Amino acid sequence: MNVYAIEYIYDPDAEPQMAKIRPQHRNFLTQLFNEGTLLIGGAWIADNHDSATAKKPGALLLMHTQSDKEALEILHNDPFYINNFIIERTIHRWNPLLSPFDLEK
């Protein structure tokens, strides 16, 4: 198994619609977390005070899967993805040297 870091960038104009779907999105991620596929996930915090660190709305997910293809196929079922709220996804295979997670599986 490998660890992948996936960054979501959200459509900044979709927040009102995203709020309606967010419970489904969180339930989907909770299921992945409970089965051990999602190690950690969360949204970027908007920092409007410092434009040098301001990020587009989005999130970071760390997933434990066999391949990047498998990770993305799983995330195709995310309600945010299905509803076209994610305008960009990037994925990187990651080698965590220190981790609280059991990654030996």
Image (cartoon, rainbow, N blue to C red):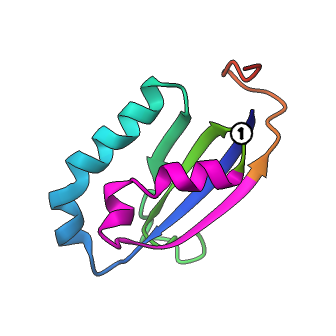
Q: Position of residue 14 (x, y in %)?
A: 26, 76
Span colored in magenta = 68-92
Quadrant of the image for the N terminus?
A: top right
Residue 94 position within the rendered picture, expressed as x and y whole percent measured from the top left = 78, 46
| Residue sitting at x 72%, y 20% | 105
Q: Nearer the viewer, residue 79 or 47?
A: 79
Q: At which x and y percent is residue 13?
A: 28, 81
Q: Amino acid at mark 1?
A: Gln
Residue at image x 79%, y 27%? 98
Around disc 1, counting alpha carbons within 10 Å, would you say few (fewer than 14), some (14 to 19), or many (20 or more)? Answer: few
**Depth check, front residue: 89 or 56:** 89
Q: Compared to 48, does 96 lie above or below? A: above
Asked whether, in this view, residue 52 is left or right of residue 95, the answer is: left
Q: Is residue 35 above or below residue 84?
A: above
Does 81 sit left or right of 88 as displayed? left
Asked which secondary structure carries label 1, the reply is loop
Q: Is residue 91 magenta?
A: yes
The foreground one among 41 and 1 is 1
Q: Residue at x 67, y 59 (%)?
A: 91
**Numbered circles on residues, count:** 1
Is 33 located above or below residue 53 in the figure?
above
Q: Which residue is mark 1?
A: 66
Q: For residue 26, what is the image quadrant?
A: top left
**Which residue lies at the image location 46% right of the left edge and 30% below the top edge?**
33
Indicate whether 14 appears above or below 95.
below
Residue 60 is a magenta residue: no
Q: Is residue 2 left or right of residue 79?
A: right
Question: Where is residue 102 drawn, in percent x and y?
Answer: 69, 18
